[in-house]
Image: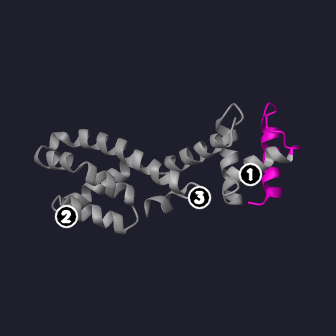
Amino acid sequence: MTKESFGKKMKYLNIAYPSFKLDIENQMHLEVWHDILGEFEDEYFNTILKDYVKHNEFAPNSPASLIVHAKKMLLSQIDIGGTFDKLIDRLRKEFYDVELVANRYEKGGNVAVAKTLRELKTNVQTWRNNSDQLPFLKNAFEKTYAEYLMREIDKQVFAITDASRLIGE
C-alpha cells in the first residue's frame, strides 16, 4: 500500500474517531504506522478498517490493535465445528488411521488440522474405543485447532485476505 493511500486511510480513522491520537500531519507518525501496516493489500486494509470501526467503540491505540483485529476477522471466517465434523468423517472412512488423515490434510494445505490431529492422536484412539468421548474430543480439537490457526495467521496475516486460503480449501 502506498504512503499516500495509507494517509487517506488514517484520515478515515481520524474522522471515525475524533479522539484518535495519530497526528496525520506529522510525517514521522505516519511513517511509523505505515512501516508496520503497509504490507497489507490496499483493499484488504480498507476492509479491516471498516470492520474495526463498525465493531469497536474506541480508536486503535497502536498498529498492533489493527493487526489483532485482522487476525480475529480471519479466525471468525473459519467454521471450526464444521472442520471437526469433516475430520471425524475422514477418520471413520480411513479406519481411524490418524497419520494417513493428517498427511492428507497437510498435503491439502491445511497444516493446522494436521498438527491438531497428531497432537490429539491419543484422544482419537480413546474416542474410537468409547464413543462417549466424542464431546471431549470435539472440545479438545476446537481449542487446539484455534491455537494452531492463530499461529498460521500470525505467520501470514499480511498476505491472507480470505480464510479459505489459510485452511487450504
Report x, y in % for residue 162: 55, 58
Judge from the rendering whether residue 82 lies leftward or rightward of residue 132; answer left or right.
Answer: right
Judge from the rendering whether residue 92 lies leftward or rightward of residue 45; answer left or right.
Answer: left
CA–CA distance in space, label 1 to label 3? 18 Å
**Which residue is located at x 26 percent, y 62 percent?**
101
CA–CA distance in space, label 2 to label 1? 49 Å
Residue denoted by label 3? 161
Residue denoted by label 1? 34
Give, as a three-letter code, the residue at label 1.
Answer: His
- Label 3, residues with CA under 10 Å away: few <14, some 14-19, many ≥20: many
- Label 1, residues with CA under 10 Å away: few <14, some 14-19, many ≥20: some
Quadrant for the N terminus in the image: bottom right
Mark 1 or mark 3: name the one nearer the start of the chain.
1
Give, as a three-letter code, the residue at label 2.
Answer: Glu
**Which residue is located at x 25 percent, y 39 percent?**
135
The residue range painted magenta reads 1-26
Residue denoted by label 2? 94
Mark 3 or mark 2: name the one nearer the start of the chain.
2
Quadrant for the C terminus in the image: bottom left
Look at the numbered disc 2 and give the secondary structure of its residue.
Answer: loop
Task: Report which quarter residue 55 is drawn in.
Answer: top right
